[in-house]
Image (cartoon, grey):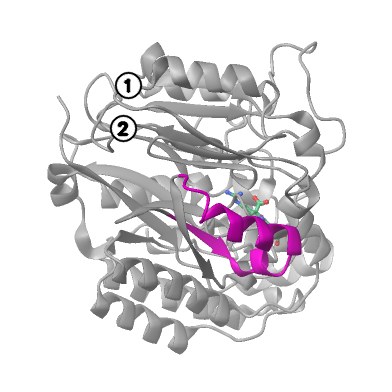
Amino acid sequence: MSQHAVEANFDGLVGPTHNYAGLSWGNVASKSNVNAVSNPREAALQGLAKMKRLADRGYVQGVLPPHERPHVPTLRRLGFTGSDAEVLASAARKAPELLAAVSSASAMWTANAATVSPSADTADHRVHFTPANLGAKFHRSIEHVVTGRALKAIFSDEGYFAHHPALPPVAQFGDEGAANHTRLCAGYGDPGVELFVYGRCAFNDAAPAPTRYPARQTLEASRAIARMHGLRDRNRVFAQQNPAAIDAGVFHNDVIAVGNGNTLFYHELAFLDEAAVLADLRARLTGTDLHAVRVSSEDVPLEDAVASYLFNSQLLNAPDGMVLAVPGECREIASVSRYLDALVGDGGPITSVEVFDVKQSMRNGGGPACLRLRVVLTDDERAALNSGVILTDSLYERLTAWVEAHYRDELTQDDLADPMLLDEVHKALDELTGILGLGSIYDFQL
Ligand code: SUG
């Protein structure tokens, strides 16, 4: 039976150590901005402004907290000893690449936080969450512990919410969460089809795979999550990403496709077998017909799609159709800007475009869609969650003041070893868990 449900978007609040360390081979923006000076304050305020604009438009908007960085416990696990200040100084001297990795604010990209299956799709009719192991990159592989704690603190009612541990931390189960997962449905409360997109098959060496850049998500990981979440065959489709797209810098599927409701907006080079993906979706989607909005290479060459992050947009229901919330870079690239102008007038499902400035995040390869985790919730589930994380006018004001009080406006790689930075972060995050009503979720608090 279908219930009224909404899509809530939980954005990652950018952490105080946001920096450009060039940590993500395969992510063109991350590599090309290595060692640039970041502005954590501006980054966090850009993120909050995006959340506020969407909340003002009536969308349910939540906030997920940043993580404790630099993560000193990880440096200790890697053999650094002494006081916290000594650990930081010694890591900076002997292994600056490790200090950079444990200092990344990458938890801001909450599309990678977890895979979420709405209760309308799952066997036990609960919302299921699996934090992503993010095993492809060391700096991201340390996120799932605190992500899991935060999700449990927010969605704590076991009558409505089920939490699974991250998959085994090996490359064969590489899992990147919702960045490789999108859901198509008639209404949000109706059973839907969850599309899991993987980059390679881990247990089949003969299967096609990219040759230049890594494929982060495996078929085996996607299948395991679908099993854990209790999805039936009619509720899920597995599709392989086009290896050539990964080799062109499409490190997650959400850099080349996005779905909402009955609409899949994608580039013609997104999937290895486009026709099969569409046929599989059509065969399973009930109560509506699939709208495939296909962008050709002729209209938008793959490299323009990667540079503009056209597909890393949020596709949201609007009163008169759907709105595409795009990053500002889409208006700076001629082919993409032209395409968007034509798209809104073509009589299709996407009826408007809104531009968001998330430049600080974009320089690390994170657009509007990377910054949010979608959680479809029925009215009862929404009433059951910890509402301290839902953005209201007053929470927005408190968070803005909190950022202004605690964040620096400039951060370089050298600053990461500054013991004062660690103190600032602990103080800020301790205050934040109070503001959001999360209890203790950080190692330094436990
Ligand atoms: O995992 N960048 C992130 C960007 C994640 C984007 N998310 C989605 N597409 N959903 C990544 O590659 C770069 C950090 C640095 O280089 O400092 C980074 O981790």
Between marks 2 and 1, how big is the CA–CA gap? Answer: 7 Å
User: Would you say residue 332 sits in the magenta stretch?
Assistant: yes
Q: Quadrant of ligand 1?
A: bottom right
169 on left or right of 233: right
Name the quadrant of the C terminus: bottom left
Q: Against 45, is 383 above or below?
A: above
Q: Which residue lies under the disc numbered 1?
A: 286
Amino acid type, mark 1? Thr
Whether the residues at callouts 2 and 1 have beta carbons within 8 Å, the answer is: yes
420 on left or right of 203: left
Viewer-proximal residue, 262 or 29? Answer: 262
| Category of crowding for the residue at label 2, using alpha-carbon neighbours closer than 10 angstroms: few (below 14), some (14–19), many (at least 20) | some
Residue 81 seen from this side: no
Q: Against 422, is 446 above or below?
A: above
Q: Which residues are magenta?
A: 323-348
Residue at 23% over, 30% down: 126
Residue 323, picture quadrant: bottom left
Viewer-proximal residue, 426 or 322? Answer: 322
Residue 54 seen from this side: yes
Q: Which residue lies under the disc numbered 2?
A: 186
Amino acid type, mark 2? Ala
Q: Position of residue 443 (x, y in %)?
A: 44, 58
Q: Determine the secondary structure under disc 1.
A: loop
Q: Determine the secondary structure under disc 2.
A: loop
